[in-house]
């Protein structure tokens, strides 16, 4: 009874070691791929942290997986920013100018989230140039909000900062897209 178990262990041990090495190499190549892609980003640290933010995602597989992660993370931040804008809009003490700019931002972020949804559909269809078009449109919307809130009031300062981060995340999608399209 002990002999068959030992034989199995002797056979399985090298196989398990080989599997563990393969998994470690894949994880390492995923990290290397992220770092390689993010070297072309203006905000490398944000690029690396956002692409690593989804555990067990498709990020270590290939550029398509990285772009999908980048879109998902940017979309989540855009949706969260849209929610914070709408929460601020419920403040009845806002100056009319601030209120109008935030209402415009709300519309722009709603558009940006929809454009990111469209970019996912384009990515899944391997239409990389369409992804670029949708992401550039989302950048335009988020940038308009960023500019509109830049010098308004302390209440809109958070929206300015968040918009700046969303624009950077959207630009990181374009970094991945450029590499994917050139592949």
Image (tube, rainbow, N blue to C red):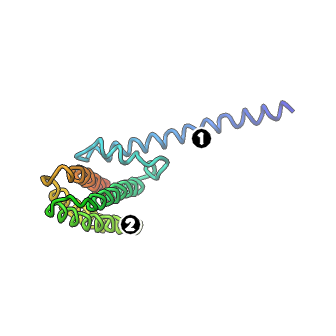
* Residue 104 or residue 64, whichever sits in front: 104
Image position, residue 109 (x, y; %): 28, 63
Q: Residue at x 84, y 30 (%)?
A: 2
Q: Residue furthest front?
A: 93
In which quadrant is the C terminus drawn?
bottom left
Residue at image location 39% in from the left, 53% down from the top: 66
Residue 19 tag number: 1
Left or right relative to 170: residue 100: left
121 or 165, which is in the foreground?
165
Residue for badge 2: 126
Numbered disc 1: secondary structure: helix
The answer to whether 25 appears left or right of 16 in the picture is: left
* Number of other residues with Cα within 10 Å of mark 2, as a class: few under 14, some 14 to 19, many 20 or more: some
Residue 181 at x, y percent in the picture: 31, 60
Q: Picture quarter containing residue 36?
A: top left
Up-down: is 59 above or below 86?
A: above
The residues tagged by marks 1 and 2 sit, at their Cα atoms, a distance apart of 31 Å
| 155 left or right, relative to 78 | left
């Amino acid at each position: 009874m002990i002999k068959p178990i030992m034989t199995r262990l002797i056979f399985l041990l090298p196989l398990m070691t080989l599997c563990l090495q393969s998994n470690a190499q894949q994880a390492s190549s995923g990290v290397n791929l992220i770092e390689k892609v993010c070297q072309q980003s203006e905000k490398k640290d944000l690029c690396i942290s956002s692409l690593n933010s989804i555990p067990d995602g498709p990020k270590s597989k290939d550029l398509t997986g990285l772009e999908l992660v980048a879109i998902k993370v940017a979309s989540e931040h855009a949706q969260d920013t849209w929610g914070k804008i709408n929460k601020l809009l419920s403040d009845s003490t806002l100056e009319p100018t601030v209120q109008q700019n935030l209402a415009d931002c709300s519309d722009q972020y709603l558009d940006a989230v929809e454009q990111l949804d469209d970019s996912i559909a384009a990515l899944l269809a391997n239409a990389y140039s369409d992804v670029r078009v949708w992401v550039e449109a989302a950048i335009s919307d988020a940038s308009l909000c960023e500019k509109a809130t830049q010098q308004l009031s302390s209440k809109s300062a958070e929206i300015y900062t968040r918009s700046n981060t969303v624009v950077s995340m959207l630009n990181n999608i374009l970094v991945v897209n450029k590499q994917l399209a050139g592949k």
